[in-house]
Amino acid sequence: MKLSNQDCSFFFESHHHELGTHLGAIAQQLLAEETFTHDTEYIAEMGRRLGDSLGLYPWLTPDDGLVDTRALCLIRECLGYASPLADAIFAVQGLSGFPVLSAGTTDEHKSLLVDMQKGDAVGGFALTEPGAGSDVAAIAMSARRDGDSYVLDGEKTYISNVGIAAFYVVFARTDPDAGHRGLTAFVVPNDTAGLTTEPIPMSIDHPIGKLHLQGVRVPVSSRLGNEGEGFKLAMKTLDTFRVSVGAAAVGMARRALDEAIGHVRQRVQFGKPLAEQQMIQGYLADMATELDASRLLVLRAAHAKDTRQNRVSMEVGMAKMYATEAAQTIIDKAVQLFGGLGVTRGLVVERLYREIRPLRIYEGTTEIQRLIISRGLLRDGDSNA
């Protein structure tokens, strides 16, 4: 596969190109063992491999605390192409590790980061609740101080890495009357008394489920940051990794385009290959153009995050929104080019059709990105008036 550092080199530095070479070898390995059956054992093993043998987790929680956004985008572009399952596990390892990296202060937190980098500990990011999705301030899970402990009660849903996570970063309400300022984050080991999990059957074989916390007691030392800093920590985490969602979409879309090109070159209809028919060529042209537009938006946002001091939420919102929506369109066209075969279970484009859909929802829906973009435009307009 071709990664974006190869033909958009002006966005990258030398260490990114070294990483790109390493990722090329990883892609070949993952593609060679490609499987459409993901049982729990395979998923857990993939979670470990991303750290111990593939060496990708240290990019999520670097020792200097400075996340390299362009490196994350290259990694997720590669994983999105070669193994969307691996990409999903990698992404959540970042979401759960970054709050510990940013706000963890104890020796236990530091030790946990070491285990995460090696792949000995996979994490989960427990933010969403039945009544709190895009509206994070509506979180209802409670965290009551009781001496040297907190007692957590409530439910989380659509939490990734359920079943393979060694711990969860859980966001709960320590002040019931303070709105978003009343949220606090905690590290909760998966074997804590009172914590139970429930898998959610999904259209794709990913480890996603519910967390039920009933009288879960954790020490004060498990808290990340101070009370009331949970919302800020959650938003900082999502803002750090959101643009990489667009990069994963780019990888999936590129895979779909490659699969479509290979198919239309071989498939003969009406006496000639599909690739020689003008309507088919038009499809391919549109798909390639949408893909490149997505790549440029993603790389612009990633470069800006790495090199600017000011916030780049608007650029990130554009990249996440456009790349995920475009990838859905590109993959849909790839399915169409395969005809009836395209909706056959087990075909690459059929799997991608199911894999791409959640990317338009998680880490901020397309609708939320539109709000972020428009608010940025209006704010800039006010400052220039």
Image: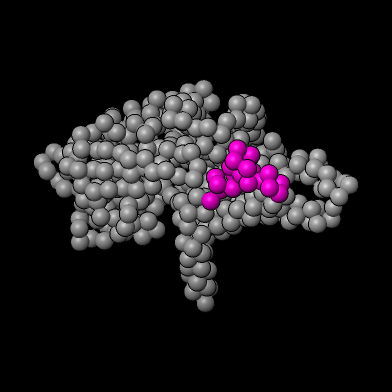
- Please tell me whether the stretch drawn in magenta is mainly helix, strand or loop: helix
Location of the N terminus by quadrant is top right
Q: Position of residue 47 (x, y in %)?
A: 46, 30
Coloration mode: one colour
| Magenta stretch: includes residue 355 | yes
Total labels drawn: 0
Q: Is residue 328 above or below residue 221?
A: below
Q: Is 113 in front, or is 192? A: 192
Q: Is residue 147 visible?
A: yes
Furthest toward the left, the residue is: 147
- From the top left corner, tell me how far across and down residue 144 is, in percent: 16, 48
Q: In the picture, residue 93 is in which quadrant?
A: top left
In the displayed structure image, the side of residue 160 where residue 11 appears, left or right: right
Which region is colored magenta? 338-357
Decide if residue 124 is on the left or right side of residue 381.
left
Q: Is residue 12 visible?
A: no
**Of 245 and 8, the residue lying toward us:** 245
- In percent of width and height, residue 301 lies at 57, 52
Q: Is 119 contained in the magenta span?
A: no
Q: Position of residue 251 (x, y in %)?
A: 62, 43
- Residue located farthest toward the right when viewing the structure as drawn: 271
Give the residue drawn at x 32%, y 54%.
130
Q: Quadrant of residue 273?
A: top right
